[in-house]
Structures are given as structure tokens and as C-alpha cells.
Image: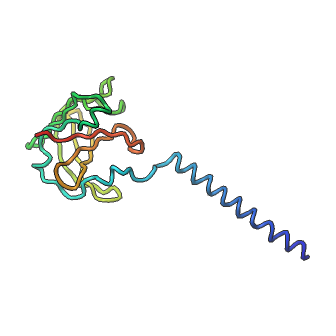
Amino acid sequence: MGTLRWLRVCDRPSQDFTTALCVFVVLVTLSAVGCHGVNPAELEFTRAEPARVDVVGKWIPTPDTLKETKRSAVALVLRDDGSFSVVDLPMSLEVPGVSRERVLSGSGIWRMQEEEDGFRVWVIHLDFASHHRETFHLRHQRPPYLIHIYLDDPDTGDAMLLERVH
């Protein structure tokens, strides 16, 4: 009887180890294939409503973005009347209207909107005349703002930043 009790006590740590190992393997697997949490850039997304006057104008890639993407022709113009035009904006091939070079040009109507994504942020919706929408985030808490455009899955961190030039 004493030996049987001793075997049960000694057997328990190995069961705890096996359980802990299984939990560890599951967590590692989930972290490898799932969302990796908040991208540090997302912490800079604009949380207070920007003045329209601080958003209207011509937007071009920041110098750092130009070094990384080498796409100097990119230009986004947000007009005060709510219209926009964009030239050679890098996009995923899945986006309607994107060229084989993975760029999008077009025009339509834009608007700013508050969105809730874990925390309140302000975005710019571009509604293209070709009947699809692209949504970009504003960055910084006060002017000058940046426009943050994901180039791929947000988990990769690949993004283009546009700055307003006038």
C-alpha cells in the first residue's frame, strides 16, 4: 500500500510536465500562425478627430518610404470638395483595378471616419469610381499627420507612409 501511494505521488509530476508541454506547444503553434498583437506603428494612429484643413492637399511618400519602395511617382490628392485622385499607389494584386505592376491609379470620393479597432482611430476612406473602397490610417496625434498604407497583411508591418506637401 505504501509503495502504491508513492507511485501515485511520483507519477503526478510527469503528468504536470506533460500537460505543461502540451500547452506550450499549442501556444507556440498559435502564435506562429495567428495575429502577432499590436504593430508598434498602430500605437501612433490618430485618436482625435483631425481638422479637415490638416488633411486636404497633396500627399507623397516620405523620404524613408522612397528609399524602401523606390516609387517616386506616387501621389494622392485629397480635395476640399471631397474628391480625390491617386497615381501609382502600390497595392496588393487582389485589389480591384490594380495593374500588373501592383499599382493603383484612379479617382473618386474620400471621407474621414472614426473607427473602433481595439481603440478609437481615424481613417480615410477612398471610394473609387470603380466601386471599391480602400481605407488608410492617419498617424500622429496632431499635425503634421502621415497617411499609413498597409502594403500587405498588417502582421508583416509592410507599410507606405505619405506626407502632405501642400
Residue at image coords 14%, 38%: 58
Q: Which corner quadrant holds the N terminus? A: bottom right
Image coordinates for residue 88, horizontal then vertical, percent:
24, 28
Image colouring: rainbow
49 relative to 2, above or below: above
Residue 110 picture quarter: top left
Image coordinates for residue 148, horizontal then vertical, percent:
27, 44
Image coordinates for residue 64, horizontal then vertical, percent:
28, 37
Q: Who is closer to the viewer here, 76 or 65? A: 65
Q: Who is closer to the viewer here, 164 or 133? A: 164
Q: Is residue 143 visible?
A: yes
Image coordinates for residue 79, horizontal then vertical, percent:
10, 40
Q: Who is closer to the viewer here, 26 or 38? A: 38
Residue 132 picture quarter: top left
Residue at image coords 24%, 54%: 46
User: Farthest residue in the bottom direction?
Assistant: 2
Q: Which corner quadrant holds the C terminus? A: top left
User: Farthest residue in the top direction?
Assistant: 100
Q: Is residue 83 visible?
A: no
20 left or right, relative to 114: right
Residue at image coords 61%, 55%: 24
Residue 75 picture quarter: top left
115 left or right, relative to 15: left
How many marks do you count on the picture? 0
127 relative to 118, above or below: above
